[in-house]
Image (spheres, rainbow, N blue to C red):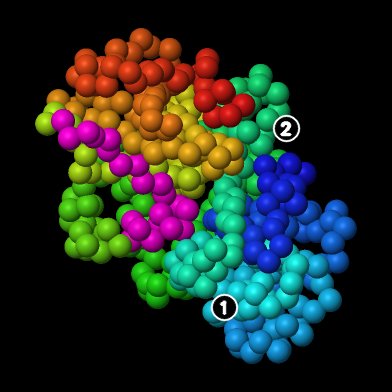
Amino acid sequence: MIKRYYHNLNKYLTKNKVLVIYGPRQVGKTTLLKEFLSHTKLKYKLDSGDNIRTQQILSSQDFAQIKEYAAGYELLAIDEAQRIPKVGMGLKIIVDQIPGIFVIATGSSSFELSGQIGEPLTGRKRTLTLFPLSQTELADLYNPYELRQNLSDFLVFGSYPDVITAKSKKEKIVNLEELVNSYLFKDILEMERIRNAKILLDLLRLLAFQVGNEVSLSEIGQKIGIDYKTVARYLDLLEKSFIIFNLRGFSRNLRKEVTKKSKYYFYDNGIRNTIISNFNNIEFRDDVGKLWENFLVIERVKVQAYKGIFTNNYFWRAWDKKEIDWIEEREGKLYGFEFKFSKEKVTFPKDFIEAYPSCNLDIINQKNYLPFIGC
């Protein structure tokens, strides 16, 4: 079993607060919870949001009934909590009415879509986001040499747990197809009552071909036959479902800078490649630069989340189309990175250097990428 970054949940538990673990489907939230419970010394109760009786009790807002349900336990763990209507209110009652209790709730991105956790648990929760396996986590399984040797697989097939542990290329593809066809849109279709998954898939297919490029909502809308406001809404839903990541342009209001458009990346390379049905090895592809950029962006986002690196992330582009792939603004300083799969020499834009002379600039390539992504 691959050890997850959050394997020791004791570090994140606080009495009378809810520890919320959420993220995309099939990334291992249930496995993480059960592995922790198998070693805890706390007297615990594990329940599932799929249990109809549990749904009835925790959505009842009946103080006496809910207190009786959790009585006598030091830890209450609810898996798939997003299936319980008004679960935030039920959990609020537990942490408010039962002194000293610990609570863990796992759930998919519909927590974010429905808003049912946020407001009721204001000041009463801590949230951990679990992603597909990070290179930092895989470093427990592979040494640096092996991570580099397996880079082609990570770029093509991504890092969902079932994909990483698959024994063959065929099994990896089957698992990815199942993820896309059965799980990818599940929260959006359930919570937002969107009937046509085909439009979402068409939208994602267009984004997949534009990884690393700025996206025009109007152009996308014209191509798939919906207006730009609907495109914006769908993009927001796809972001909240941890399918795509939105990177905005950086500017301090210099006239030469462009900031209105965004770039979109996929939270997993394997999902991106499944959407465009391309599992060719990298030596036979013309999009390896996009795969490399997407991989580095998302691995960096995982490291920032797991290791508490608080930063604002951007890209930079001028009107003459000169760009810097990745800008981090943290602790009052700027850091700029250009992503190159090959070792080609890069010249950073003169306009940027003159505008931001104190910015630290670096090139991330196959030779030096591991420290950048936390390995």
Residue positioned most to the top: 345
Residue 24 falls in image quadrant? bottom right
Label 2 crowd (10 A; few <14 / some 14-19 / many >=20): few
User: 150 left or right of 238?
Assistant: right
Residue 250 falls in image quadrant? top left
Q: Does 159 appear above or below 32?
A: above
Residue 157 at least partly seen: no
* Residue at image point 77% right, 85% down: 68
Q: Does 64 appear above or below 35?
A: below
Q: Amino acid at mark 2?
A: Asp
The residue pinned by badge 1 equals: 89
- Secondary element under disc 2, as helix, strand or loop, is loop
The residue pinned by badge 2 equals: 140
Q: Does 190 appear above or below 225?
A: below
* Magenta segment: 234-254
Q: Position of residue 139 (x, y in %)?
A: 68, 30
Q: Based on the picture, tell me whether residue 249 belongs to the magenta stretch.
A: yes
Q: Position of residue 129 (x, y in %)?
A: 57, 52
Q: Based on the picture, tell me whether residue 150 belongs to the magenta stretch.
A: no
> Relative to the observer, which residue lies in front, 42 or 52?
42
User: 131 left or right of 144?
Assistant: left
Q: Amino acid at mark 1?
A: Met
Foreground tag (2 vs 1): 1
Residue 227 at least partly seen: yes
Q: Position of residue 119 (x, y in %)?
A: 48, 70
- Secondary element under disc 1, as helix, strand or loop, is helix
Q: Earlier in the sequence, mark 2 or mark 1?
A: 1
